[in-house]
Amino acid sequence: MRAFNYTRADSPAAASQAAQVEGAKFIAGGTNLLDLMKLDIETPAHLIDVNHLGLDQIEATPEGGLRIGALVRNTDLAADARVRKDYALLSRALLAGASGQLRNMATTAGNLLQRTRCPYFYDTHQACNKRNPGSGCSAIGGVTRQLAVIGVSDACIATHPSDMAIAMRALDAQIETVRPDGSTRSIPMADLHQLPGNTPHIETSLMPGEFITAVTLPAPVGGTHIYHKVRDRSSYAFALVSVGLILQEDGTGRVAVGGIAPKPWRVEAAEALLPKGAKAVSERLLEGATPTDDNHFKLTLVERTLASVLAQARETA
Amino acid sequence: MTISRRNFLILGAVTATAFAMPPFISLKAYAASLEQPAMSKITLQVNGKPRELEVDTRTTLLDALRENLHLTGTKKGCDHGQCGACTVIADGRRINSCLTLAVMHDGSEVTTIEGLGMPDKLHPMQAAFIKHDGYQCGYCTPGQICSAVAVLKEIRDGIPSHVSPSLTEPPQLIAAELQERMSGNICRCGAYSNIIEAITEVAEVPA
Amino acid sequence: MKFDTPATTNPIDRLKVIGQPTERIEGPLKTSGQATYAYEQHEAAANQAYGFMVDSAIAKGRIKAIHLDDAKASPGVLAIVTAENAGKLDKGDYNAAHLLAGPEVQHYQQAVALVVAETFEQARAAAQLVKVDYETTDGKFDLAGVKHLGVEPKDELPDVNHGDFDKAFAAAPVQFDQTYTTPDQSHAMMEPHATLAAWKGDQLTLWTSNQMVAWSVGDIAKTLGLPKEKVRLVSPYIGGGFGGKLFIRADAILAALGARMAGRPVKVALARPQMANNTTHRPATIQRIRMGATADGKLTAIAHEGWSGNLADGKVELASQPSQLLYAAENRRVSMRLAPLDLPEGNAMRAPGEAPGLMVLEIAMDEMAERLKMDPVQFRILNDTQVDPVKTERPFSQRQLVKCLQIGAEKFGWNQRNAKPGTRREGRWLIGMGVAAAFRNNLLVKSGARVRLEQDGKVIVETDMTDIGTGSYTIIAQTAAEMMGVGLDDVVVRLGDSDFPVSAGSGGQFGGNCSTAGVYAACVKLREAVATRLGLAADQAEFADGQVRVGNQSLPLRNAAEGGALVGEDSIEFGDLAEKYQQSTFGAHFAEVAVDAATGEVRVRRMLAVCAAGRILNPTSARSQVIGAMTMGVGAALMEELAVDKRLGFFVNHDLAGYEVPVHADIPHQDVIFLDETDPISSPMKAKGVGELGICGVSAAVANAIYNATGARVREYPITLDKILDSLPEMI
């Protein structure tokens, strides 16, 4: 870990402005950033602590939705009564992630911006286009059981590891930001994460120094919410496949899938096939998938998991 | 000072022309060579006592406790948030002290295993771990105990878990809830079954 | 004390203190964080500096150049150790690869340098500035691909050919032939390997985390070219070992070298992501089992042939060994082949040989029982043997496998199991039960201790025995208290210091029996000294309640030390009883699993182990050993695998996020039953080991339960859900 200067920011705009200093980076929960700094994967020269900006509130919006401060901890978001009642998918996804200790630290914005858990990304002895652009990808042709099956490129087959992001995608969340010049904008969740293409080191559509201030949820959509995370052990593990489902009584609904792609994977055209069942949805959702021998099973697993949550949702409804 | 391509692209720093000092970053701090450790004076409230120390900004809360304050009850098992041996209670919540910086906790109240109880005056959770043999090598044990104390509070506070059948009902004090909530504390010796019995015994005594 | 005739009645048989479910005596220290491990010895030496290891980026080849300029210029750096400046280094007798690479690199993440600095942060930062140029050479990384290169390990397991296997197998009415694999596994103990090293002149002291103090003193001396007398090793608490700390590792040698170069004490801990490739692991195996049986289920032929790989000086994994002894059959072939691999060193992990061997053999037994249309419990009972099947004149000293199976079946509700797979369903979940035999040999190793009666009446026990979570402190205190007739509070136990008499150490589940037998021997000496001092006949003296009695005469024990402390020191040495009798421990594991019918996720719902392992010295800590081993067995069944990148030659998932071990939520309440057994052939303690018995067979019981639940017979561990998806019911 390189030496760095540490400062506490006192306003979002100041934080964004401070990020203009070369090598500056925001630190919130720190659970992913410090992990990567210890391994010399992240090497900030300045850390701007954004934990004291008062962005830890969850407020109702005039539109009937919720505005979740960027620094709301995963535990608090999952436990919020409004989220539990109206956005159960979000609570469930959060609670399926990490551990109690990590959820007490990790923040809403930090969770969205966490980086891949690809073991080749984590091993600095190995070539990785995400860590060291142009160096190649050691993962392709290697041990790929955990890695992505769709949305990948010849440069990168890493997944996005977040559970929360799957729910945010299904709930049509909007990401609110402030830029160094003080201007603000709102980014649809669908547009936040980028597919790797030839530039796997560019992971989001955020501009340099752009700072997430909140995540906004539209008014509740109702329906039955289920998040099923499939993993190799019962808890405290990343997903092989996770399926987030919101099913309405008329059989329509929304599906977002984790563990299979570089971003939360949701295909609206596939959702339209929900009344036809899991097979139809999965086939459309996974169209163009390019699995490896190691992770081909994820295609079957997506379909079976979706079938299972659909059955559960129908029972619950 | 050099800037690598990946820093430029990923860290969101702007071009060199926008090299303006934000007002709240002290000039002194900024002038310090990046190659030199940046030191910071902080005060931690550790187990009820204020402890002033000067730390490298890189020092984790875990290393500040273990190396600076010689409170070695908090363990380093993985240093990457993958095992839970470093669990402490900071400002009322259990956290992995390996994944947070000491400087981020200036002014925080931190309770470590030493603060829960010592051999001559054990916390009920420590006593229950001994009674139920909820440990073997002892290395994950302080983290398990800190976590267990916090878990009971989380259940009392109504915080749901992955295995809570309902999100709208209060969580129950049952083994499955304890097992899920304790899953961030790995015990390779495999004392899990005994640990759950120890926690259950403490839970059944009204707090 | 020479132990060469079966034990008769002795003071241990009183079982006033020993044999009781005593709480661990170090419990208050461990639960309050006051037990200090290797990296926590702030009081041991002043002015400690920090070392951080630099590890190799390649699996095999040479270091062309190491560029240290940036690291040397980094703030706080005091010294950088490399093979070029370390002086001549030998290799320890117990190490397969050198602990410091250069110029040759033998495996991935082998140490190439140590950076010493004033602070941990500075050492780590500087270590990340060390740049190394390598020349890579091709290596062998795929066991299946080099299997044909395997050679017979003549020193470890020469081929066993008893009767005529080929003929008997060909003639058998029911035949079975399957091949299985077990993966590389990581010890993943919670405390990383760590050492504080300090020199006083030419005298080196290492505070380290090590299971085998005397072995390791020898290997440190050999590696550094020092006389053994110049090395002291202190290992009072060990944060888990499981075989991974049997030997010295890079932390110890690098700390010693770094301290010498920096001229001050240096401490080094391996970073977690360095451990899996830098240290040892349980080697992967390929195992083929063939069995022939009569139509009514009598085994007539067994062949268990296995393959494992290792570095040139490494050993074979003795996976087929249990098939020498576990079941009757007149015709038998048991063999292992050791193939060359350039992966990190494979070595002992909890129950080496038996653990991976039974993972396989006990699935095969389940498969064979099904083929014979027999209950798997009955099939095992039918093929029990009370003698060594190869040397039939050699009986087992004790063998209660049948009873373990019978009691377990009854307690577990085995009769509720439906033999037809996939027939029991509860909602989303498919339910199944599995059984497996547990078997682990009882090993005997010389062990010494020194016991001192102080003037205040305290009894001090000193031995270099270690406590790796096994309960050594407590059972040794219980042994001394029983022998000297004092309370547990009057005994002080000091362990893990090479200044103390050499013990068996912690390994091979021999530590509990052998180290307490050594304390027994020393106590016998001390009792003689006490009796002599008190003017009593030693052979008639009874030590109880702090008194020494002969007939009507009774004197306080402490009177014997009025004129100065009395010391008894001795070792237990084992004669040829182990040749006359086969000494083994036995058990039966039962598991019930639920498998998600859609996703194949497995949840273990119930577990029971029934163990027959000689006298249980402390039922509390022994039970903990067994449940811990059962937990590790669940990990081996369901998730543990060091994934090999066969192109680049390394374990890819080398941290605790990638290498998954069981968490709380994976483990249900576990039940353990110990059969009442004393084994006078094993030692004066009449005890054997349980710590490794507990893992033997567990994984197969889980595997068999998964088969019973789903019909998925997986022969490649671990049984992850991707391997059973295709066997699950169709989804509608």
Image (cartoon, rainbow, N blue to C red):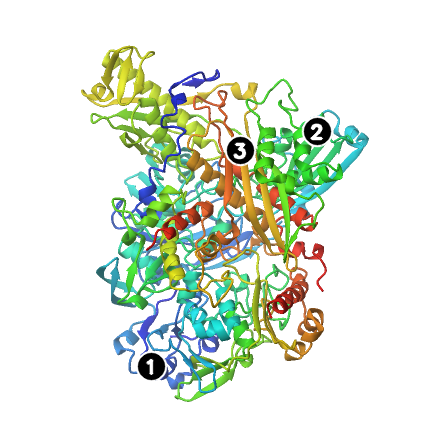
* Vertical position of residue A59 compared to residue B125: above or below: below
Element at badge 2?
strand
**On the rendered image, what quadrant is the N terminus of chain C found in?**
top left
Residue C374 occupies which quadrant of the picture? top right
- What kind of residue is marked 1? Ser
Q: Which residue is mark 2?
A: C332
- What kind of residue is marked 3? Cys
Neighbour class for label 3 at 10 Å: few (<14), some, many (≥20)? many
- What kind of residue is marked 2? Arg
B115 or A157, nearer to the observer: B115
Do badges 3 and 2 share one subunit? Answer: yes
**Image check: C474 left or right of C605?**
left
Look at the image and tell me whether residue C729 can be seen: yes
Look at the image and tell me whether residue C261 can be seen: no
Q: Which residue is mark 3?
A: C611
Q: Earlier in the sequence, mark 3 or mark 2?
A: 2
Image depth: mark 3 or mark 1 in front = 3
Gap between marks 3 and 1, in whole Å? Answer: 64 Å
Residue C382 at x, y = what percent?
68, 29
Gap between marks 3 and 2, in whole Å? Answer: 27 Å
Do badges 1 and 2 share one subunit? Answer: no
**Image check: C564 left or right of C297?**
left
Gap between marks 1 and 2, in whole Å? Answer: 78 Å
Residue C411 at x, y = what percent?
56, 37
Residue B41 occupies which quadrant of the picture? bottom left
C409 or A262, nearer to the observer: C409
**On the rendered image, what quadrant is the C terminus of chain C found in?**
bottom right
